[in-house]
Structure formats: C-alpha cells, structure tokens
Amino acid sequence: MSRPQMLKLPEVLIEIDMSRAAFYRMRARGQAPRIHKLPNGHLRVRRSDLDAWWQSCETGAA
C-alpha cells in the first residue's frame, strides 16, 4: 500500500499562487485545503486534499 503524497506548505502556496497570510485567512474561514500537522510540527497538505480543493474552486466558480 502506497502512502499518500504530502506537500509542504510552501509548495502548496507556490502551486495556488497565494501568500501565506492569504492562505491562513482562507483557512480561518474554512475555505482552504486541509492541513495536517506532523508530530515534528511541520505542516503538510495531502495531494488528494489539494486536488479536491481545486475541484471545489472550479465548481464554485461555474
């Protein structure tokens, strides 16, 4: 069984072309992809969560 691809927050911010501050504002409103905090404190976003978020953005814009 393969592990899901986990992206670092800076990688996500580059992909969605958004500042960290804007991302956290969206997160506070419940409008950002889900973040997973690892035991070492690092933040990750699953590729599948980011893809689902992109899909919801496209659906909402239509």
Image (cartoon, rainbow, N blue to C red):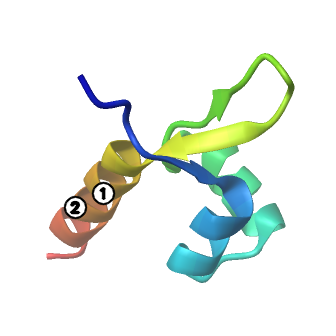
Residue 16 location (% of width, % of height): 52, 75
* Dot in front, 1 or 2: 1
Comparing 35 with 58, the one in front is 35
Residue kind at label 2, given as amino acid type? Gln
Q: In this view of the protein, can residue 29 be seen by the observer? A: no
Structural crowding at the residue carrying mark 1, measured as other residues with C-alpha within 10 Å and reported as few (<14), some (14–19) or many (≥20): few
Tell me: 38 left or right of 17: right
Mark 1 sits on what residue? 51
Q: Quadrant of residue 50?
A: bottom left
Badge 1 vs badge 2, beta-carbon distance below 8 Å: yes
The residue positioned 52% from the left and 50% from the top of the image is 32
Left or right of residue 59: residue 52: right
Looking at the image, which residue is at 73% across and 65% down? Answer: 10
Tell me the quadrant of the picture where the N terminus can be found: top left
**Which x, y percent locates residue 36?**
61, 29
What is the x, y in percent for residue 5? Answer: 42, 45
Residue pushed farthest top? 39
Quadrant in the picture for residue 27: top right
Which mark is drawn over residue 55?
2
Q: Find the distance from the CA under tag 1 to the CA under tag 2.
A: 6 Å
Judge whether 39 appears above or below 17 on screen.
above
- The picture quadrant where one finds residue 39 is top right
Check disc 1 and report its element: helix, strand or loop. Answer: helix
Quadrant occupied by the C terminus: bottom left
The amino acid type of the residue labelled 1 equals Asp
Q: Residue at coordinates 22% horizontally, 61% vertically from top-left?
A: 55
